[in-house]
Image (cartoon, rainbow, N blue to C red):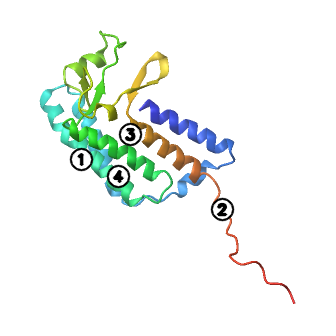
């Protein structure tokens, strides 16, 4: 999540620096908002089920995780003409492929330098994270899972996937492009000579 907050903040700053007006983002019209709300509800349900740290809840969260991603991909499809949507959709598709391949959870290749006493590591190794599954060694489509370490606040880093990076670029492009003024229309033909 830190990646997306950082990308949004950076994109807003860049948009302003190059003469954009971020208030133009309010003019963006998203189609099929009900699907977006359903995707959000599915993701919130997964997060809430994850707080229980119970195996039954984690098992219930796996299909919801896939359903949420499919709904979000449908929203991207209906809004594919929005700047950045295709990049976002490509990243989401990669994430969805790997999530389905690993039974409804994103694979995480555990870094060798991780603190062995980390609570996050204990949850991952215990199989009680509804969003992620720990991999001790590369297997299957691990290379499109969470493998890139991104520095975070307070020295904590987070792992992201190629799909996450593409989605972040799509969000950045949306913010920067939509904050710029619309290009002025130019006449197709030159002006006729005056008589």
Residue denoted by label 4: 36
Please name which of the two marks, 4 or 2, marks the residue nearer to the observer.
2
Residues under numbered marks 1 and 4 in contact, where contact means CB atoms less than 8 Å apart: no
Which percent across, then down, holds residue 20? Answer: 65, 49
Q: Residue at x 68, y 41 (%)?
A: 17
Residues under numbered marks 1 and 3 in contact, where contact means CB atoms less than 8 Å apart: no
Residues under numbered marks 1 and 2 in contact, where contact means CB atoms less than 8 Å apart: no
Comes first in the chain, label 3 or label 2 = 3
Q: Residue at x 68, y 45 (%)?
A: 18
> What quarter of the picture does the N terminus occupy?
top left
Mark 3, Cα crowd under 10 Å, few <14 / some 14-19 / many 20+, is many
Residue denoted by label 1: 67
Which percent across, then down, holds residue 45? Answer: 25, 39
Residue denoted by label 2: 183
Mark 2, Cα crowd under 10 Å, few <14 / some 14-19 / many 20+, is few
Which percent across, then down, holds residue 163? Answer: 38, 39
Residue denoted by label 3: 163
Comes first in the chain, label 1 or label 4 = 4
């Amino acid at each position: 999540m830190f990646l997306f907050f950082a990308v949004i903040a950076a994109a807003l700053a860049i948009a302003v620096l190059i003469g954009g007006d971020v208030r133009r983002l309010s003019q963006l019209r998203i189609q099929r908002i009900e699907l977006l709300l359903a995707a959000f509800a599915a993701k919130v349900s997964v997060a809430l089920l994850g707080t229980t740290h119970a195996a039954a809840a984690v098992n219930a969260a796996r299909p919801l995780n896939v359903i949420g991603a499919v709904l979000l991909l449908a929203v991207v499809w209906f809004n594919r003409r929005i700047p950045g949507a295709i990049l976002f959709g490509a990243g989401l598709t990669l994430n969805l492929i790997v999530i389905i391949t690993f039974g409804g959870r994103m694979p995480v290749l555990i870094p060798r330098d991780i603190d062995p006493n980390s609570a996050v590591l204990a949850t991952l190794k215990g199989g009680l994270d509804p969003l992620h599954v720990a991999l001790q060694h590369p297997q299957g489509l691990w290379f499109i899972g969470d493998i890139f370490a991104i520095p975070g606040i307070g020295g904590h880093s987070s792992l992201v996937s190629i799909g996450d990076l593409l989605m972040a670029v799509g969000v950045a492009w949306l913010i920067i492009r939509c904050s710029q003024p619309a290009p002025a229309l130019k006449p197709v033909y030159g002006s006729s000579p005056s008589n």
